[in-house]
């Protein structure tokens, strides 16, 4: 009887350890090719934590900074900050967002748009850079220019965090 109790205890402890290691419970921001699910980069995030996608606008060649908030099941594009107008950039407040001039003269378009993912085609000139966790990651270092990459919220296990290229 005692031997059987020990076996049951060992099995239960093993199951608990496996659940601890393999159960997905950590929110991450994952960067992957849009056409292939294997992650190029991931970063452990807290719900509500924000990252900035910085790039050079393709028409006016001026910097743009998109702030993106990570939620458990979606991303929220909070705002875009830029210093001059260009193709596709808002020129006034609309139903979709509010445009204002900041103290330092930049334009800030607040939209708070929820999205399941944000897809970016890495540009030759755009120099797409993800600013997160006190680091700057050039997307061209993860995939070649012309490649579409997707930023997605995901839930990872400890095992996924250990084996991947996750920033903590």
Image (tube, rainbow, N blue to C red):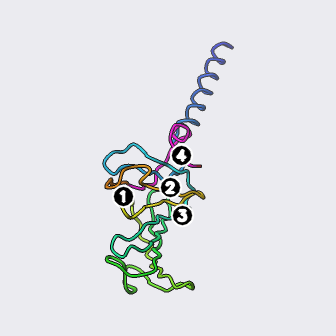
**20 sits left or right of 107 in the view:** right
**Dot 3: what SS?**
strand
Numbered circle sitting on residue 166: 4
Which portion, as a residue range, is magenta? Answer: 150-167
Say whether disc 1 or disc 2 marks the residue closer to the N-terminus.
1
Foreground mark, 4 or 1? 1
C-alpha separation, residue under disc 4 versus residue under disc 1: 21 Å
C-alpha separation, residue under disc 2 versus residue under disc 4: 12 Å
Say whether disc 4 or disc 1 marks the residue closer to the N-terminus.
1
x, y percent for residue 41: 47, 48
| Nearer to me, 71 or 4 | 71
Q: Which residue is mark 2?
A: 137
Foreground mark, 2 or 3? 2
Say whether disc 2 or disc 3 marks the residue closer to the N-terminus.
3
Crowd band around label 3 with a 10 angstrom C-alpha radius: few (<14), some (14–19), many (20+): some
x, y percent for residue 117: 39, 58
Residue at image location 40% in from the left, 86% down from the top:
93
């Amino acid at each position: 009887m005692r031997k059987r109790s020990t076996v049951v205890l060992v099995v239960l402890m093993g199951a608990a350890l496996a659940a601890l290691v393999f159960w997905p419970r950590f929110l991450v921001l994952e960067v992957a090719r849009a056409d292939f699910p294997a992650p190029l980069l991931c970063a452990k995030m807290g719900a509500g934590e924000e990252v900035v996608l910085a790039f050079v606008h393709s028409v006016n060649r001026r910097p743009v900074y998109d702030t993106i908030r990570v939620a458990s099941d979606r991303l929220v594009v909070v705002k875009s900050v830029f210093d001059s107008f260009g193709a596709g950039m808002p020129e006034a407040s609309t139903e979709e967002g509010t445009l204002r001039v900041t103290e330092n003269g930049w334009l800030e378009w607040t939209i708070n748009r929820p999205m399941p993912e944000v897809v970016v085609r890495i540009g030759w000139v755009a120099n797409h850079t993800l600013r997160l966790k006190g680091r700057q990651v050039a997307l061209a270092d993860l995939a070649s220019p012309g490649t579409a990459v997707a930023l997605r919220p995901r839930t990872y296990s400890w095992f996924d965090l250990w084996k991947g290229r996750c920033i903590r």
